[in-house]
Image (cartoon, rainbow, N blue to C red):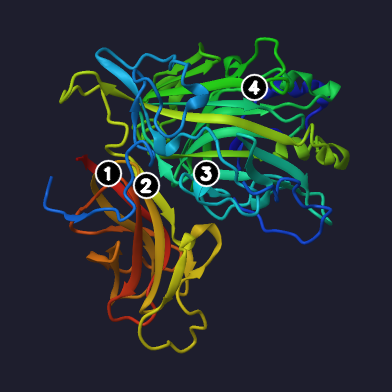
Amino acid sequence: MFYIYFRSLRQLLLPLLAILMGTVLYGCGGGGSSSSSEGSSSIAQSQSSSSSSVVVSSASSASSDEVGSSSQQSSSSDAAAGVDWSDLPVPADPGTGNTWELVDAMSDDFSYTAPGDAKGQDFYERWSEGFINSWQGPGLTDYHAPNSAVMDGKLIIEASRKPGSDEVYTGAIHSKGSIQYPVYVEASVKIMDQVLANAVWMLSADSTEEIDIVEAYGSGRPDQTWFAERMHLSHHVFIREPFQDYQPKDSGSWYTDGRLWREQFNRVGMYWRDPWHLEYYIDGQLVRTVSGEDIIDPNGYTGGTGLSKKMQIIIDAEDQDWRSDDGIKATDEELLDPDKNRFYVDWIRVYKPVSMTPGSGDEGASSSSAGATITTDFNTFFATGKEGEPVADDSIDGFNPAAGGSITHNTLGDWGEYSITVPEAGTYRLEVDVASPTESGLAANFMIDDIEVGQIAITTTGSWDTYQTFSLDTPVTLTAGTHTLRVESAGSAIWQWNGGVIRLVQLDEL
């Protein structure tokens, strides 16, 4: 994530400077595997365990309770996920005439098994490994897919030494879906006994807006007690070029009540009520409120819109260079200790406020799924190939997976198939983020469950690295359930486009 940055600090000044200073680093991606047992993760292996639209029904359509649709808090149970929190009311106020409704597609009680090196469908329905792009993490961090796993009803983010280096392998995962205010996000977490940061946070696709729900350092070293007793509750707004960052630096952003966050599970929640208002909750109690332009974005980095962009959820652990540059590094002994090297997440739940009056147009309410976004990285296809003749100098048969979730070197006729889970029946806009310097002849054809749904005409973006969003002219109507989406490069140009992200943006409910 993005963090407060301190350089060349004396140990005795760390607590004071943690409040007073605030330059930022870019921090959180997916690491590769290693054949060396020295640096392998102990969790990598586990025992098995409103306009016209195209209408598509799911061949494997399940009931809404089975595929992550929403469920009102007032109901007797919380849909497919949520047995761990079913008796815990949402502590924030949803507004007059509203109640809280679970966004099941972004909530998880981790009641399944997903080994680090073979996570499986239950995991991939909601999560992707690594950061939201190809970035590998701050400082000495190297995000490494086998260092995240689901075991014994909990998500585990493990830290281990990267073989032959002073870098640290850690796990990182991010939600496939994105969410926008008003929304309440809460996680039950136990912080690892390390100098590393443990984090649950949210970030916009362009990395210009961030909300930190959990950020904590649990080390039991005597000189780290100040940090071990605090939970950092903050947010950032950025300008990327030239880089500028703002985050609040008031003492209230470092919450403490005397507990050590590594010693027990703690509920940490955040209510993003609107672009100018955030509330933070610990174990159901309101502990911090930031509201208004003067504390959300006093420098105008968002252009007057505040925290307004859709964000994905990220869960990770990190070495942060404001600490490691000052000699505060995880030791080999600490990283080998399973009692110290694991960040646990028991559950994470996401709620939206909805009107209690059927058919109400209350502007303060928002459907749990209407307006939600289902995001799929282009490199997560389960099948790929090529239609038509081979292309000279193209040695890849089908889509070519690349770093950061993308595909590259895409030529005419290349195709990929994706498994897409739709949480609720509705009308969706299908869009893609692609890049190409080719001047003309660019397109992409789409099929859902073997039904042709249309073609997106693509224009040049100026380079292979400059991505723009293009969408299908006609919305598609989808049932709740798992669908197979096929994307094929089309048009007349031989060399087509690089693909970044596929999105389904809900427009209406059915």
Point 39% across, 72% down: residue: 415
Identify the residue position indicated by label 4 in the image.
Answer: 265
Distance (Cα) linking label 3 and label 2: 13 Å
Q: Is residue 143 visible?
A: no
**Residue 351 in the image: x percent, y percent?**
39, 27
Badge 1 crowding class, 10 Å Cα cut-off, few under 14, some 14 to 19, many 20 or more, is: many
Q: Tell me whether circle 3 and circle 2 mark residues in contact (CB < 8 Å).
A: no
Q: Is residue 190 left or right of residue 110?
A: right
Which quarter of the picture shows residue 451? Answer: bottom left
Q: Is residue 197 above or below residue 425?
A: above
**Residue 350 in the image: x percent, y percent?**
43, 29
Badge 3 crowding class, 10 Å Cα cut-off, few under 14, some 14 to 19, many 20 or more, is: many
Residue type at mark 2 is: Ile
Q: Is residue 191 left or right of residue 224?
A: left
Distance (Cα) linking label 4 and label 2: 30 Å
Rendered-image quadrant of the N terminus: top right
Residue type at mark 4 is: Phe
Identify the residue position indicated by label 1 in the image.
Answer: 506
**Residue 242 in the image: x percent, y percent?**
51, 47
Identify the residue position indicated by label 3 in the image.
Answer: 174
Point 75% across, 24% down: residue: 14
Q: Is residue 500 above or below residue 349?
A: below
State which mark lies toward you, 3 or 4: 4
**Residue 151 in the image: x percent, y percent?**
64, 39
Residue type at mark 1 is: Gln
Which quarter of the picture shows residue 252? Answer: top right
